[in-house]
Image (tube, rainbow, N blue to C red):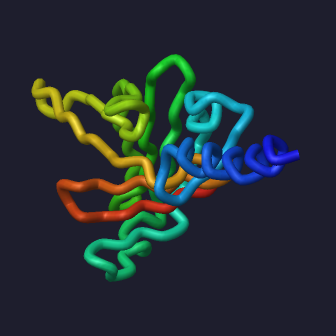
Amino acid sequence: MRNIIGLFIVFPLILLSCKKYEEGPLLSLKSKKERLANTWKVETALRNSEDISQEYRNYHLTFTKEGYFFVFYVEQSANSTIQGTWVLSNDKKEISTSYYVDTQTKTITYKILRLKENELYLFDIETNTELRFIPS
């Protein structure tokens, strides 16, 4: 009986310690790549706790399971696209993206705060910006 009670105490502690991202999820049956592979739009953008969501209202971001990403946006009535590659890094706690701009490779790494099938929260350390995405 004591072993069963101990199991009920230890099991939740093990589950809580397995939580990879600050904001969840606790447990998922889908792989991180499967959850990330989607077309997303910015629901909320915060820079230094200030809401800057309006700056991202015309952006859509697509991640593929094969490791490619595409950013589609409208700027001054013109459609634009950025495309590149992505990988999970730092024990799958970050997403590193690479793309070309004017013959130079640009790399941006985002800390993953939340990665669910219908929510993606990323933090850009360089710009101190949190981006909260929902499926597009």
- Confirm whether residue 106 shows in the render: yes
Residue at position x 46%, y 21% from top?
67
Residue closest to the far top: 66
Observer-nearest of 66 and 117: 117
- Total of numbered circles in the picture? 0
- 7 vs 74, left or right, is right
Residue closest to the far bottom: 50
- Confirm whether residue 136 shows in the render: no
Q: Position of residue 6 (x, y in %)?
A: 74, 48
Observer-nearest of 55 and 27: 27
Vertical side of 11 occupied by 130: above or below: below
Residue at position x 23%, y 55% from top?
125
Residue at position x 41%, y 64% from top?
56
Q: Position of residue 38 (x, y in %)?
A: 61, 38
Residue closest to the far right: 1
Residue at position x 49%, y 70% from top?
44
In which image quadrant can residue 27 be found?
Answer: top right
Q: Position of residue 105 (x, y in %)?
A: 16, 27
In which image quadrant can residue 131 be found?
Answer: bottom left
In which image quadrant can residue 7 be found?
Answer: top right
- 39 vs 42, left or right, is right
Observer-nearest of 131 and 111: 111
Q: Position of residue 88 (x, y in %)?
A: 40, 29
- 51 vs 104, left or right, is right
